[in-house]
Amino acid sequence: MTRTAPHPPAVSPLFLGRPLSLADLEDAARRGRPVAICAEARARAAASRRAIDAIAAAGDAAPAVYGINTGFGALAETRIADHDIRALQRNLVRSHACGVGPDLGEAEVRAMIVLRAQVIALGHSGVRTEVLDLLAALLERGVCPRIPAQGSVGASGDLAPLAHLALALLGEGEARFEGQLMPSAAALAKAGLAPLELAAKEGLALINGTQYMTALGALALRDAAALCTAADIAGAVSLEALMGSKRPFDERLMRVRPHPGQAGTAGNLRALLDGSEIMQSHADCPRVQDAYSLRCMPQVHGATRDAVAWAAEVLTREVNSVTDNPTVFLGEGGAELISGGNFHGQPVALALDLAAIAAAELANISERRVEQLVNPALSTGLTPFLAPNSGLHSGFMIAQVASASLVSENKVLCHPASVDSIPSSAGREDHVSMGSISARKLSQVIENVRNALAIELITAAQGVDQRRPLRPSAGVAAAHAAIRRVVPGLVEDRPLYRDIAAVAELIQSGALLAEVERAVGPLN
């Protein structure tokens, strides 16, 4: 499992209880930015906890309040005796820890912890500050609860994954510490932390919410936004290799169809292709129009940009939302607890399903550009399959096949999970979002898109090599140089899987974008 890269100590902490962006969440989850609980959040949490303590102190004389002195779900009408309230919360966490499948990665778990702490810090959960502090300490000390990836239907929140997170606070279940999987009690002890005994409502507050789907979805959307720009770079390299035209990216065309994503991609392509000697060499050629996969990049990549941006707005709202139940509201007349449905993941599920469809299109059009590059009927002046000696060598023949495979897999993954609902809890929870599945699918689509773009980049770089001595634009030359630092040109057939992985890492690390931006300035 990949460890997060810690920030240097001088980096300012991320204050929970204040508005967070998706970039903030990614910074804490992937790069180890420290978190802290702001003073106002601590005060809000303590005030809301006093309302729960008042109900608990009233004992059996208190009115029935869901999740505090009642059972859960279909058992909500079952009254729980005062002496069993703490056992109720412990039993809830234990019984709901039903996750299956592969374990989440460290970054995804850290994102879940940040988001769970953020909800409590907003001051409507009625959870003690001790719980908030232990969540923050898990992040600070590097304790990573083991959370299986499957088992949530996305309402009443991500119950099973969050229950595995809550188990670690009890010293139960398993966690990773310093790269080793061990019982959570041992991980806490090695980190100098002590487990908690949950008080009234705290087990429910820890597992009710959308923090699993939101954590995975937010990180995937950050990747999707980066892949939009990587797709522009890959498309520019392919356009140069295919001796295409940049005229379809004219700013005047963008103004008369003013979708912001389309304009952003067109602006990137103009910057990436400026000053190309290859383009100047065929300025007066008889070709009238390029294939759609080349000249429609602003329209296709741009539509993805707009969809991903909308999904990011939805997820940003969710990151800063209170999603547990019941919710504590404090007023002059005292505290009021309202049972509702903020744990339902439908807003997130719909956004992530759309993001998966949108991101998949980047691979779809990329594979068509690869076909243009390797098909001798379409790639004038390039060798068949870009092979050094066609026939003796197969070149990039099967690289295109691999890309087609990824595209086809994405088509299956893009079926929206949010259109399904299987009732649970004896019919009480009769409509669920399946948002956890939306998030998992999006994560896989993103990985497939990254690999498809890597295939395009290594293929297009070989095409640019074959255009020598003509030189590409500065932007494409910078991308080509970055690729060639990790992948040599193809002079005879070799296994390409290492090349694909190396360029996928070049994309994921941000090194490709950084190299290109040093040559052409900031891209959209």
Image (cartoon, rainbow, N blue to C red):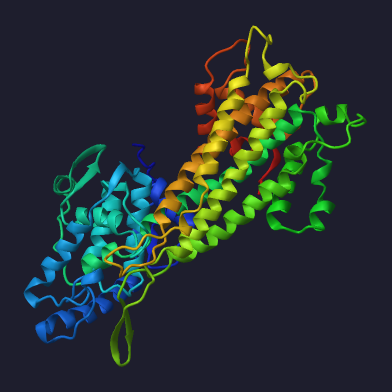
Residue 459, x across and y down, in percent: 64, 25
User: Quadrant location of residue 238?
Assistant: top right
In this view, 384 is above or below 447: above
Is residue 214 visible to the viewer in this orientation of the structure?
no
In the image, 367 versus 173, the foreground residue is 367
Residue 80, x across and y down, in percent: 12, 75
Residue 44, x across and y down, in percent: 31, 76
In the image, 280 versus 347, the foreground residue is 347
In this view, 232 is above or below 372: below
Q: Residue at x 12, y 69 (%)?
A: 86
Quadrant (top left, top right, bottom left, bottom right) of the N terminus = top left
Q: Residue at x 48, y 58 (%)?
A: 419
In this view, 280 is above or below 66: above
Residue lying at the far bottom in this picture: please name it.
333
Residue 127, x across and y down, in percent: 24, 70
In screen coordinates, is 501 left or right of 239? left
